[in-house]
Image (cartoon, grey):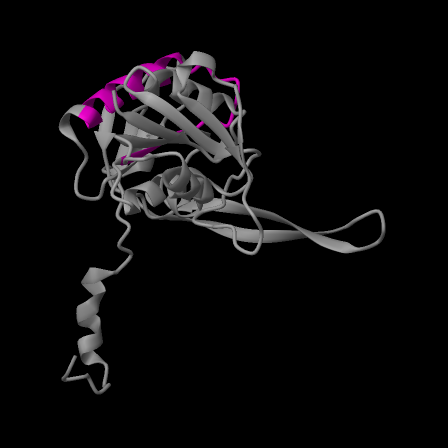
C-alpha cells in the first residue's frame, strides 16, 4: 500500500480531519500533517521569518503511519511534510473535511483548498473536501460513505490534468445526498465590510463582516448543485491566466517586442 497525505486548515484536532483519516486509512498508509491550531482562510500563505515546528502526536492511533502537528499554515504543512516525511511521492493528498463551504469564490480564500493545491503543484493528485455546514458535531456517516467512493475512483481512474478537485457536501435534512454533480465554479463574491468598535481601553478596532453575493444564475454551478442536495465536484486550475482576455490587448497601442 502506498502513502496518502492528509491535511486540513481547521487544525489537527478537528472532527473533520478524523473522519477523513478514518476513510483514507482504508486505501493506504496515512501520514497526517496538519496545523496545530485553526488556520481557516489562510489561502496560500506561507511562513517566512520564523521557524516552523513539527510535533509527532498520537491522536489517530493505528489508523495512521504517523501524525504531526505543524506550527504553520496549511500550505506549510504540505510543503514540510513533502520535504521531511516522504521518501517518495504519496498516492494522493487529501485535505479536509473542512467545517464550512469552499464552493464558488471561497476556493480563493480557503486554507483547505490551498493545501491541496500545494500538493497538486508538486504533481500529486489532490482533493479538498468541505462540508457546507459549520457544525463540528455533524454526523459524518453519509460524508464518509461518499468520500470512500470518490477516493476509490480517484485511485482507480486517476484525476484530470489539473490534478486537483474541490468537493463540497451539501446540508440536507437527513444528511443524505441526491448524487454527485460535476460543475463549474459559480460567479459570486464576498462584500467585505468592517465594523468599527472600541475596546475597554478606549482603542478603536475593526471587525470583519460582509455579505455573500451570488451573480450566477446558471444551473451548472457548484452553488446550484449544493442547493439541490447534490455533492459538487469542481476541477480546479492553478493557472490563473485569463486566456480568453489575451486577444483584448491587440487593441492596445503599445509597441510589442519582436524578439524574444
Q: Position of residue 37 (x, y in %)?
A: 57, 34
Q: Position of residue 217 (x, y in %)?
A: 29, 43
Q: Position of residue 151 (x, y in %)?
A: 26, 23
**Labels in figure, total:** 0
> In the shown orientation, is residue 111 left or right of residue 177?
right
> In the shown orientation, is residue 4 left or right of residue 42?
left
Snapshot quadrant of residue 161:
top left
Q: Quadrant of the C terminus?
A: bottom left
Q: Which residues are magenta?
A: 126-155
Residue 129 seen in the current view: no
Q: Position of residue 230 (x, y in %)?
A: 29, 25
Q: Quadrant of the N terminus?
A: top left
Residue 26 seen in the current view: yes
Residue at 55 percent of width and 40 percent of height: 53
Is 217 in front, or is 192?
Answer: 192
Residue at 43 percent of width and 44 percent of height: 75
Amino acid at each position: 500500500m502506498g502513502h496518502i497525505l492528509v491535511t486540513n486548515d481547521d487544525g489537527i484536532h478537528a472532527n473533520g480531519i478524523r473522519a477523513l483519516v478514518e476513510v483514507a486509512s482504508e486505501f493506504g498508509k496515512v501520514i497526517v500533517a496538519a496545523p496545530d491550531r485553526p488556520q481557516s482562510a489562510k489561502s496560500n500563505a506561507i511562513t517566512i521569518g520564523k521557524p516552523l515546528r513539527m510535533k509527532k502526536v498520537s491522536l489517530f492511533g493505528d489508523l495512521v503511519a504517523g501524525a504531526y502537528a505543524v506550527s504553520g499554515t496549511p500550505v506549510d504543512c504540505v510543503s514540510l511534510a513533502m520535504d521531511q516525511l516522504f521518501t517518495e511521492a504519496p498516492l494522493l493528498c487529501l485535505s479536509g473535511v473542512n467545517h464550512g463551504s469552499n464552493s464558488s469564490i471561497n476556493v480563493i480564500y480557503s486554507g483547505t483548498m490551498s493545501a491541496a493545491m500545494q500538493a497538486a503543484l508538486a504533481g500529486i493528485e489532490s482533493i479538498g473536501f468541505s462540508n457546507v455546514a459549520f457544525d463540528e458535531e455533524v454526523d459524518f456517516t453519509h460524508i464518509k460513505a461518499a468520500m470512500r467512493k470518490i477516493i476509490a475512483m480517484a485511485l482507480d481512474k486517476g484525476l484530470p490534468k489539473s490534478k486537483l478537485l474541490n468537493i463540497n457536501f451539501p446540508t440536507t435534512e437527513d444528511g443524505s445526498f441526491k448524487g454527485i454533480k460535476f460543475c463549474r465554479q459559480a460567479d459570486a463574491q464576498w462584500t467585505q465590510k468592517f465594523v468599527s468598535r472600541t475596546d475597554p481601553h478606549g482603542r478603536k478596532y475593526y471587525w470583519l463582516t460582509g455579505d455573500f453575493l451570488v451573480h450566477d444564475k446558471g444551473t451548472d454551478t457548484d452553488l446550484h448543485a449544493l442547493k439541490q442536495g447534490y455533492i459538487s465536484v469542481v476541477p480546479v486550475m492553478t493557472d490563473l491566466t485569463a486566456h480568453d482576455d489575451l486577444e483584448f490587448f491587440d487593441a492596445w497601442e503599445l509597441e510589442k517586442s519582436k524578439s524574444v
